[in-house]
Image (cartoon, rainbow, N blue to C red):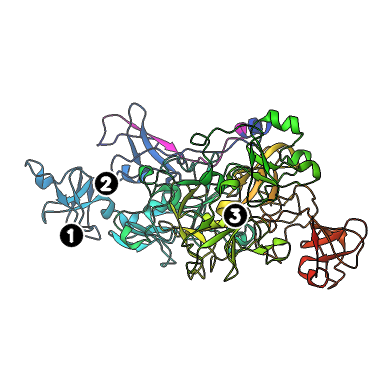
Amino acid sequence: MEELKHFTHDHPLSLVYLNPNRKSENIEEEEEEEDGDEDDFYEEEKHGGQCSMCKEQIYSFHLCYYECKSCDYSLHKFCAELPEIQNNHPLHPGHNLTLSERNQRFKFSFEYEWMCRVCKFKWESFFNYYCSTCNLSMDIICATISQQKINHPSHPDHQLERMFGRMVSECDACGEKHDGHFFQCIICPRYRIHVDCALLPAKLLIQHRTNGTFTHSHPLTLAYSFSFSEQKVRFDPLCRVCDGAFYEHLWIYKCDKCRYYVHVYCATSKRDAFVSILLPSSLGRTFKNYKDDEHPNLLHCPFSDEGDNLLKHLFFNQKDDIVKHDGEMLNHSSHQHPLILFDTQTSLANEVVSLHDPMKKIQLLCDGCVRPITRVPFYKCSQSNQHCGFILHEWCAKLPSEVKDYVGHPEHNLEFLPKVSSKFFSVFGCPICKLPSNGFAYGCMMCEYYVCINCAFIPEEITHEAHPGHLLSKIKSSANLRGRYCLACDNSMDNIVGYHCPSCDIYIHAKCALLLPRVIRHKFDKHHPLSLRYEPAENHISEYFCDICEDEFSPWQWFYHCTTCDQSMHAACAPVILQCEQATYTSYLDPMYIFKFLNVKFGRTLEIKGHSHRLAFVQGIKHHGICIECGDTLQYEMIFKCLECEFAFHYDCADSYVESEDEA
C-alpha cells in the first residue's frame, strides 16, 4: 500500500522507495554537461533513518520503507506489515501471540524489564509477541527471523537469511569475531556475515571516528573482495589505518581515485568491545602511546631538509652558544690549516662563497658529516685561495673527543678520528648504516671498528611522522628480527640497527629514519621542493615511475614527490644532483634504498706511479666505461678516473696502482 495507517503512530505513513544507485535520465543528462569528476556520494548510504519498531537502520537493500511526512517516524516495510495477532507461530505453536510494545505481564505493574525467551536478551521497552497463556515473550526480531531474508550484493546468487539468536562467531565479511546477530546463506551455510557488516554503507568518508589523524577527501567504496592479483599489481598495499595486510576474500573500503585501501573495521571502528580480548593488542595509529612531558628532548623525524641533521640537534644551540663573529679563527684537529668562521650572508658575499644549491648545480658538502651546507654558520679553510676546500658545519667542529660505552662496541671507547688512516682514501664501511664513508669517524683502531659520526650518536628514542603519535625505541643490530621488515624500504630488519613501535609492531631502519629529510630540492623540478612520501599520493591512481631512472616503483616504500608537477623519485635516486643519468637506482642489485654514496665526498685527486696524469675520485657513470684492472663496468661504483684520458679503475681495484700515492 502506498499509504498506511499503523496502530503505533497517530499520522498516516507513506511508502518511500529506495534506489540511491540509480539516477533519473534527466539527472544523468545534466551531469554529462558538468565536470565528470564530481563524486556520486551518499552520506552513510541513503536510507530512512531508524525503524521505530525494531530500532535497526533502514538501508538501500531494504528497497522501500514507510515514513511519516509530519514527524520523524519511520518503519521497515516488513515491520509495518507485521500482523497484530499470530497463530501457530513455528517457535510457539498452538497459542495466539499478540504484538505490543511492552510485555503485557507488566502492563499495570512497576516492573518494566522482560526477557526474550529465544535470545535471552533483557528488554525494557521494545516490541514483542506475547503469549498470555504461557506468560512468555519474544522480541519481534527473534519472532520474525525465519522471514527476514535479504538480497545482499556481496552474495548475489543466493538470498541470506537471519540466523536465530545471538552468537560469537567470525564474520566472512571483515574476518573479525563478533557478538550478535548474523545473516547466513540459505544454500552456502558457511557464508556468514554479521548484521553490522551486512548494513555497511556502500560509500563513506573516513574522517569520522579517527580523531582527525586519518582523513581522505574522496568517498571510499565498499568492495567485497581484494583479489590476490590486484594486490600484487598494487605492490601489496597495507591498511592506511592499522598497517595490517589484506586478505583477498575479505571486504575492504577503497578509493576509486587514489591508491587508498582500508579494512572495513578500521574505516568504521566497529570492532566489538566484547571480543576485544580475542584480538591482537594494538593501540592503532589514532592513539598516542607516550606523554610529551615524560620525553622533553625527544627527537622528531624526519629532519626538515638536507641541511638539517642529527649532529646539529645534538651539538648546536644558538641561544646557549658563546657569541662569535665573522672571521674568527679555529685550529681544529681535523685539518692542518686554521679555519675561518662564516656567520652572516655578508661574509659569504665578501669571500665569494656559495652555499649548497642543487638548482644552480652548486655542491658544498661538509668534510665531517658529508651533508650539504645550506646555511650559516660554518667553518672554511683559511687557505682556500690555495685550492684547499676543507669545510665544516659549526656543530661538526664541536664533536666530543670520544664516545664511551658505545652499544655496538662496548669493549672499548671509540676515539674521534678526522680520517680513518688505515683505509685507502679514508673510505671505511660503517657497520651501522651499512654505507661507505670518508667523513669523520669514531673508531677503535685496536679492533678496526669504525662508525660514521651520525651513527655514533643514534638516539634511544624518536618519533617519526610516518607513524605519528607513537614512540619508537632503538633496537640493537644483534636482535634476531628475521621476518621483520622496515616500514620505509621493505627490506629486512635482521642484524640492522633500527627503531620499533611496540604498540603496532612497526619497524624502521635507523638510516631510513635519520638520513631521509622531509624536503629536498632537485634540478629535475626547478620550481618546487620534493616532499618525502610514506604512502601513495592523493589523486594518483596510476603507476609510479621514477623521473630519474624511469623504473616503476612501489609507492608503499618511501619516495620523494611533487604534487604540483606529479613527479616522483626513488629515495636513492633523488640525491644525485650534479651528475644525473638513467638507472642510478639499482634495487635489484643493491637493496640499500638510501643513496649508497650519501656519506662519501667525491672530488679529491690522486697521483700514482706509472701514469702521468692526476686521477679524480668520482662516482662511476655509464660513459666512464670499464675498469682497466678487472674489466667490469665502472657505473654505480666509486672509481678513480683520469682527468685527461680514459684511464680508470674501481676503488676496490686500487691496490695494484697506489703503492705510494699523493692525495690532494
Q: Is residue 604 above or below residue 189?
A: above
**Residue 551 shows in the view:** yes
Image quadrant in which the C terminus is located: bottom right
Q: Which residue is mark 3?
A: 556
1 or 3: tag closer to the N-terminus: 1
Q: Is residue 559 above or below residue 236?
A: above
Label disc, if present, on residue 428 of the rendered structure: none
Mark 2 vs mark 3: give the one in front.
3
On whether residue 22 falls in the magenta region, the answer is: yes
The reply, left or right, for residue 209 in relation to residue 652 is left
The residue that appears at 58% across and 41% down in the rendered structure is 304
Q: Residue 364 in the image: x percent, y percent?
A: 72, 44
Q: Which residue is mark 2?
A: 83
Q: Residue 27 in the image: x percent, y percent?
A: 60, 32
Q: Residue 306 in the image: x percent, y percent?
A: 64, 44
Q: Residues within 10 Å of mark 3 (few under 14, many from 20)?
A: many
Check if mark 2's residue and mark 3's residue have beta carbons within 8 Å.
Answer: no
Measured Cα–Cα span from mark 1 to mark 3: 64 Å
